[in-house]
Image (spheres, rainbow, N blue to C red):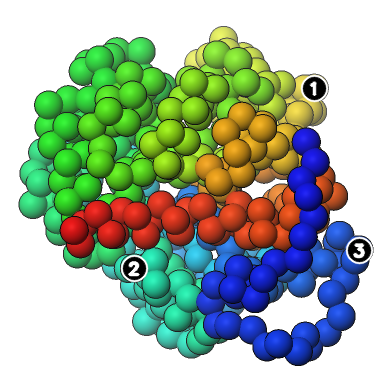
Amino acid sequence: MKHQTSLMTCASLLLLAGCSSTPSSVTATDPATRAQQLAQQLLIVDTHIDVPYRLKDKWEDVSVSAPGGEFDYPRAKAGGLNAPFMSVYIPSSLEKKGGGYLLANQLIDSMEAIVGRAPDKFAMAHHSSDLALHFKQGKISLALGMENGTPIEGKLENLQHFYQRGIRYVTLAHSESNHIADSSYDLRRRWQGLSPFGEQVVAEMNRLGMMIDISHVSDQAFYQVIKLTKTPVIASHSSLRAFVPGFERNMDDAMVQALAKNGGVIQINFGSSFVVSQANQWGLQFKAALAAAPKGTDEKSFRAAYLKQYPYPFANVDTVLDHIDYVTKLVGVDYVGIGSDYDGVGDSLPEGLKDVSTYPNLIAGLLRRGYSEAEIEKIMSGNLLRVWRAVEAHAKS
């Protein structure tokens, strides 16, 4: 699908700081060069980066080069990333054994510590308007999303506590069903969608001004959320089932259409197993081979040997762009964005999108496919900001 190419207006190019009527440099026509320019001019929001849990056991100073993962300040600046949503990930095992509330607070503390160590580079973002302010100041906004509602522990006052601590979206469940919702990964559908308490959580998130994240939940839970919510919702890091048939963790066409009707946005996950069926099947086959291996087999060495025999089929920039194209053709460009899952999907990231320095590669691909700069701005941040503002406005009303 081709899109009419147009130059962005001053207002759409810099939502942010305003722009001069006299351009400081000639606009590049080469897609790769222009993409580098746009990455620095546009606001880029990525709704899912797993830095907090990455740093839980092995602290790294991400205000300088930190090669232990896919995010640090130098690479984020190089890639033009302005507003990563840091994922406060809570393992599903803590639903039964407890400790989720404590861990969530510790992970939030760690993000505040990053800002405290480098206040010239980072700032916490609690409101959509903070992003433009921090952009003007040359700082990267750290917004917070909670991946798994386990820390709420059945108490709406805990949800309010996390809102006050800066959490601006909650992924209702993760890899197992919890006390709020069923998980797409969990064959035991305890609630057949949302629990009665989960219905209260949806209403309270609407009231507080928190975005509801339907990534990870079962299809039934998704449709119940859509029916109950008074605000647009997000899929913070999901891709499309059309490309990975049978993978419920991704969204099918009817769900994307329902999401668009709700005014929400699907943020495309970059992980290869979310993007191409071959990578998803590789993962299933590896797990089966490992399970059949002799008891006591070292998983790391087994994986290395398996990879030599069966190389991992990585996705690439174009296969990620195919998902964006698909959503645009299905429901329009207003309902798609990016939720990379950097630091969360291991060594499965696409060729050309290996870390936070590589967003220009995605932008160059969009330019080559005929997207206008105004449409690219929507994909990189505008659509997510529209949802966030709508959620804030509803809470105020």
- Badge 3: residue crowd in 10 Å (few <14, some 14–19, many ≥20): few
**Mark 3 is on which residue type?**
Asp
**Dot placed on the residue nearer the N-terminal end, 1 or 3:** 3
Which amino acid type is marked by label 2? His
Q: Which mark is residue 127?
A: 2
Asked whether disc 2 touches disc 3, contact meaning CB atoms under 8 Å apart, the reply is no
Query: 127 or 183, which lies in front?
Result: 127
Compared to 217, does 267 lie above or below?
Answer: below
Q: From the viewer's perspective, is the residue at label 1 or at label 3 nearer?
A: 3
Q: Which of the two residues, 137 or 226, is positioned nearer the viewer here? A: 226
Give amino acid for label 1.
Answer: Gln
- The x and y percentages for residue 54 are 47, 54
What separation in Å lies between label 1 and label 3 (alpha carbons)? 40 Å
Q: Secondary structure at mark 1?
A: helix
Q: Residue at 50% of width from left, 29% of height from top? A: 256
- Which of pointers 1 and 2 lies earlier in the amino acid sequence? 2
Q: Which residue is mark 3?
A: 30
Visible in this render: residue 202?
yes
At 43% from the left and 28% from the top, the residue drawn is 258
- In the rendered image, residue 125, in percent from the top left (x then y), is placed at 38, 70
Please tell me which residue lies in front, 59 or 138: 138
Q: Is residue 273 left or right of residue 97?
A: right
At x 17%, y 25%, the residue is 195
Quadrant containing the N terminus in the rendered view: top right
Location of residue 58 with respect to 347 vertically, above or below: below
Q: CA distance from mark 1 to mark 2?
A: 49 Å
SS assignment at label 2 = loop
Residue receiving disc 1:
309
Is 169 situated left or right of 163 in this image?
Answer: right
The first of marks 2 and 3 along the sequence is: 3
Residue at 31%, 53% in the rendered image: 391
Mark seen at residue 15:
none
